[in-house]
Image (tube, rainbow, N blue to C red):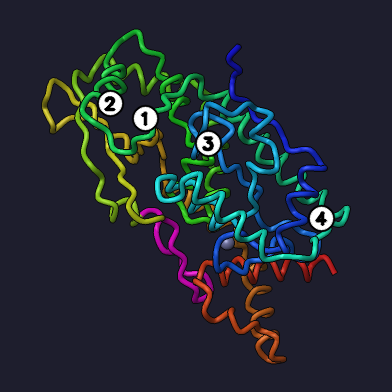
Amino acid sequence: MIETPKRLEPTKETIRFLFSKTGNQCAFPGCSHSLFQADTFLAEVCHISAVKETGARFNDKLTNEDRRKEDNLIVLCRNHHSLIDNDEFEYDTDKVLQMKREHEGQFTNAFDLSEKQMKSVESSLQIILESLERIESHLGTRNSKGKEFPEQVDFDQHFSKFLNDETDFLALFLKAQPTIEDCKRVFHEDYYLDIYEHYSHMYRELCVDPVRIRKEGDKISTEYKSYEYKLTPIDEFNSWMKERDIFGIKVDLLRKGIQMYDIRFLKNNDDRFGVSFNFWLFRKGRWVFFPKPNRVMRNINSIRSDDDLRALVKVIKGMNKIGLLPKEFLSMPDARKLSFTQELVRQLKKK
Ligand SMILES: [Zn+2]
């Protein structure tokens, strides 16, 4: 019998055994990122072969049970987790397995998880599970083709539906909701979760207030007779989303090499009249819609409240004064400086 791929959480025993060999360090060669800061888990438990067909290095020979075993798990910092999952050709199963073995070979003393640390790991797994379930309940069936650049047929199959009077536009937009993985592909690692949350919220609003979007949809099907697309210059998307200057630290919100498309619906092939939906991403055979990035920008701004910023400046200055600013701080990428300092502030607030 063929089993449907389904995410099963690793057992407590598995987690204990897995962590015992980590030396409290990310397994990526040369990375010295600690897995815990005090009791707080700052890294990610990653599947070497994904739990779902659409994930990285998926292997249909494995059972769901196999996929949650210790030998299919590796603990990495968020940075390196997204690196290996975004490039499964460079980081194929053999390479990641080798990484795991070499890392584990370095430690002779077992790293024992405290109860609090175990709780922190478990809650991070729980958060991932809940988000996956939320996403899947929205998406319905997914095309598992891995390609990231569309062909003409990918446009036609999807967007010509908008021209059909029978089409349920709400369903079409909702199917385009960005998943965590989509956000991770597009946005910087320090921001993709915030941005994902923002889009989840925005799409939930669509669900409860579908009238507005139905109206927009009706307009398309009755007034617009054709569609066209253009590749959005990444600078245009950048001008909405790019560089935040946060107390002198420049933060780039976007990853490199993203291809976004504008979809325009036209009246009778006359390109002077139309309606435009900006910022579609084609990823793994699926169209993802990032509407209104200016609203997302506002959201990111509001996360960094003035109080937070003042606290950050205080901490950096104070640590520098008493010589406590770690040497590696200065060589960290700017965005890492920011998250590093924020983590410190969180720790200090607790005390
Ligand atoms: Zn790492």
Quarter of the picture holding the N terminus: top right
Q: Earlier in the sequence, mark 2 or mark 3?
A: 2
Quarter of the picture holding the C terminus: bottom right
Farthest residue, direction left: 270
What is the CA distance from the residue labelled 2 to the residue labelled 4?
A: 46 Å
The amino acid beneath tag 1 is: Gly
Dot 2, how many residues are within 10 Å of its Cα: few (below 14), some (14-19), or many (20+)? Answer: some
Dot 3, how many residues are within 10 Å of its Cα: few (below 14), some (14-19), or many (20+)? Answer: some
**Camera-nearest label, 2 or 4:** 4
SS label for mark 1: loop
Question: Residue 181 lies in magenta, yes or no?
Answer: no
Are discs 1 and 2 less than 8 Å apart at CB?
yes
Query: Percent x, y for residue 38?
Result: 79, 65
Farthest residue, direction right: 115
Q: Where does ligand 1 appear, by image quarter?
A: bottom right
What is the CA distance from the residue labelled 3 to the residue labelled 1?
A: 23 Å
Question: Residue 285 shows which numbered tag?
Answer: 1
Quarter location, residue 67: top right
According to the picture, the residue beneath numbered tag 4 turns out to be 117
What is the CA distance from the residue labelled 2 to the residue labelled 3?
A: 26 Å
Which residues are the magenta region? 240-254
Judge by depth and name the residue closer to the eye, 160 or 40: 40
The amino acid beneath tag 4 is: Gln
What is the CA distance from the residue labelled 4 to the residue labelled 1?
A: 38 Å
According to the picture, the residue beneath numbered tag 2 turns out to be 154
Question: Residue 245 lies in magenta, yes or no?
Answer: yes
Dot 1, how many residues are within 10 Å of its Cα: few (below 14), some (14-19), or many (20+)? Answer: some
